[in-house]
Image (cartoon, rainbow, N blue to C red):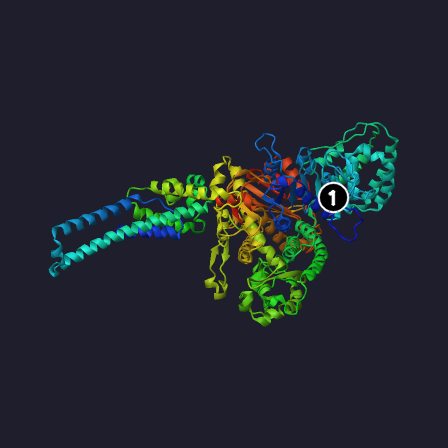
Amino acid sequence: MYGDDALQLVLESRRSALTSTLPKYSDPLIRQICLETRQLDSHIQSTTSSYTREELNSPENLGVVAGLTVHHLAARRNKRCLMAYLAGRVDGVKGMYWEAGGGVAHLLASDRGASSLDEGSSNNNNNGNNNSNSNGQAGPTTTTPHGDNTLDLRSRLSPHELDFLLSYNDLILSYKTPFLSTLDLSSSISSPPGELYVDVQVVKDCGVVWTEMGQVEFRKGSRYMVRRGDVERLIVQGFLVEV
Amino acid sequence: MPVICPPSSDLPAGTVTYLHAWSSIIRKVRANPQNSAGGVVILAAIDLDALLASHVLVNLFKQEDIPHSLIPIGGYSELETRKDQIFGSEDGRYPGNPDVHTLILLSLGSLLPLSSYFPIGTHTCDIHLIDAHRPYNLENIFGGAVNDGLGAGSRNGHLIDARNGHALSGDGDDVQDRLLGRIWIWGDGDEKKLENVKKSWEALEYEPESGSDSDSDASQSDTDLEDTDEDDEAEEDGAEDADEDRGDGEGSGGSNGKRRRNNGDDAGDQPGRRKKKRREEDPDRPKRLPRAIRNAHAERVQRYYQAGTSYGMSVVECCYILASELERGDNDLLWYAVLGLTHQYISSRIDRDTYDERHSLYLDEVARLNPPSPGRHGTSSGNGSPDDNAISPSEELRFVLFRHWNLYDAMFHSGYVAGRMGIWKEKGRKKLVGLLAKMGFSIQQSRQSYSHMDMDLKATLRDKLEEVAPEYGLVELHYPSFMRAFGYRCAPLSAADGVEGLNALLEAATGIRVEIEQDGGKGGGEWFGATKAWTVSGISGSNAFAYKEDKAEAEADGNDELSRHARIEQKRCEKNFWVSYDAMQDVKLLSRSLGLAKGLHQAIIRQGCSILDKNSMKTLRSFRFVTIREGPDLRLFSHASILTRLALWLIDATRDKVTRAAEARRKTPAHPIVLACLDEESDTFLIVGISGAPEFGDVRKNRFGLAFQSAAADSGAHARHDMFDTSIVEVRKDDLTGFVECLHLQTA
């Protein structure tokens, strides 16, 4: 049926929004949809070319017009689905960018790009990815249950998305640089800091950290009370967890 | 190395107290703001006392906005690595962290010779020792402090710098620019009773010096004669002190001598971990003690160590005293301190008299912080206001978690009732039902969960028990304790409930499978008594991430089977520590943990009953010995704290029986018990020794610590003493027989 693939794409997008994950860019599915749309287009073209305008307006050819309309709507729907998918992806990328506090290099390199968003719902996440894999990628992919999570963000993005991310970063950087000394626009505002100090638990060893107030050695399995500003980045990047 | 005492109004002026130690910490932080971020490190042993205390301390630090880190420590090997990480290791594996300026040891390290164990000679780090374990390593409390606040002569707080014995006068104000670290021992005031031991120790350590001021010593020793020693061995003391007098006389004659401290060495080796010998000989006035006196001194020091391990004031109480002195004691902190005290009492670490004494102090504190308001009724009725977080005094029955269980089970699982009734036999169980029947509690009602029991029965429970229970030999059914209300978040918890819950979390929050009854399971009759495995799923959001299993990681860097096992165990303990740490603030989790506590109690009863049923307890001359090699809960009991609880239950349960049996045969009853449990994974036996007391509510010093050590040495058994509690040891499976034989000879 026309639009089935597009529906899958939308479902996938919806799933990733619900689980706040960013699965791999489903290139095959998108190509398939584009192909379908092109087929619809050629179909419409050939039909319209075989009739004149008057013929189409006449009441006996009402069926043909209806068919054309259906094809046209299907094509438009495909387009909208594709746009929605891409918009969802872009939103996701932006969200992750802000989540990571503007650290693009860190975001792209680590596989935490996805898992930092999904701590609360790791189960859903796995299911979602499984489904998306089996639905979306018809190819002989032998992905593990964690398939998408183990990939780093760079390989989960399409080249265009990557370009977008980098230029988005450039924009933000050029915007925030002039007043970076007084205010870091890219720091998180989801929960405004209530206190100067913060209690953190170390979940990943991150070695010695030099701060304004001297060095701290974060070792796994301990809790520290440190200045929020000093470790903001580490919390965002997932080395520390606020308690 | 000052031993500091709890502040109180009747101390002589200039005594160094907790407040001084605290202000020295603050000063260190404030003085070097540029390296304060990692400056304060708290090392907390993984036990309930340290858990509570760390909470109190962290609270205080937070109020002062002092950055700090809190590190749970499972055992000596862990401590060793942490030490290396802070001070740098010799093999250069860890560079060390020069920024650490204050190290606080909670509930660990009293047996370590701190001044040599931690390289404070080359590091500016102050070390604060807060530990309830006794005995101290004498070097810690007396070393380098000939003239400090404890000395009879100068009470105005002369402090001795640990590294070279320079006396620094004043009460600590002018020592800010000290370059090297110092050790503070947070005592509980009982150190003053050790005056005699101190003299002996000093005589052994600073031989020439003790002669140099022999005049004052001689006059002192007269008064010492009357002092009783710690061990109540008064007559021996007399003889000894007489020797000493003579010795001092001869000594001041001053024959030149270089005899080394052979006897001192013997004494010194006993606590196991003494390495450094300090000897500062004064070339001007050399002098030697005659052998007899040396021996007498050595013997006294020896006796101090050999008296066995016991417990002083709980660590959390130290911290609470500090907090309340700083005017920062609030209900939360007070509650932790109460929990600490209750824990010490119900795990038989302190006797009833001590408990009563401390309890009365807390009564005042509770009254001070919880003024009676007209709106509040009795908290037990549970109709307080939503924000009612008050602590109120109460009488606690010796039934396990009875407010959260049903009456029958609560009585059934209590060690006290078990001992008096012989609960492991059919007859005993009948007796228990009979008791309930006599009180007018139907079986149905007493199996009903307590909150759903008839109101009038609950109201009369205490009176009825007092009336009927003595017929069954249950005379000490309650003790004074406290209750805390938690608003509408949770039913009020008694201190004992809180301790049970936190303890259960600390022991088994993760890593062990424990079946717990589902709420209301029994209410629907036997058929519906469903159980499920315990999980800590209550932890929400980001915290869950921190608790994720990371076994793979432990496996990755562990090639050796035993060390891998140890590492997993250590990770588990660490995780449990944090879970219980969170539970202290999260009442939901705490109230959920009561289910886990019940599960543990059931396992303990199961195992205990089967031990008693099968008569698998061997009575040796001075102790009783049980090996657990099989059973459904074997894995549970391969954890030291749970095994200790089983041992305590067994002691409670069999106390009367043993006494009676011994009386019949006119022997001294053997109350101490040694439990060995097979740990299948590491192929070792975990051995716990507990010295029970002949009376309920009494406590004896635990002598198994030293006995285990020498037994391991004599039998050549592969033993691992990693726990901070010395009376716990791991022995390789094949070495158990030899170990126990040697232990038998040792203690006979």
**In the visual, does A132 lie left or right of B228?**
left
Q: Looking at this view, is B541 or B170 the one in front?
A: B170
From the top left corner, tell me how far across and down residue B177 is, in percent: 71, 37
> Does A227 sit above or below residue B452?
above
- Identify the residue shown where x is 81% and y is 34%: B209
Which residue is situated farthest in the front direction here? A178
Which residue is situated farthest in the bottom direction here? B456
Q: Looking at this view, is A12 or B732 the one in front?
A: A12
User: How packed is label 1: few (under 14 Cα within 10 Å), some, or many (20 or more)?
Assistant: many
Count of number-bearing discs: 1
> Does A129 sit above or below residue B403?
above
From the top left corner, tell me how far across and down residue B735 is, in percent: 58, 38
Disc 1 residue type (three-letter): Val
Residue B95 quadrant: top right
Q: Secondary structure at mark 1?
A: strand
From the top left corner, tell me how far across and down residue B717 is, in percent: 60, 36
Instruction: Tell me the quarter of the image containing the C terminus of chain B.
Output: top right
**In the visual, does B641 lie left or right of A188?**
right
From the top left corner, tell me how far across and down residue B127 is, in percent: 67, 40
Q: Looking at this view, is A229 or B425 the one in front?
A: A229
Label 1 marks a residue whose chain is B
**In the visual, does A60 lie left or right of B483?**
left
Instruction: Tell me the quarter of the image containing the N terminus of chain B.
Output: top right
- The answer to whether residue A187 of the structure is visible from this angle is yes
> Does B579 sit above or below residue B451?
above
**In the visual, does A208 lie left or right of B530?**
right
What residue does disc 1 label?
B3
Residue B435 quadrant: bottom right
- The answer to whether residue B657 of the structure is visible from this angle is no
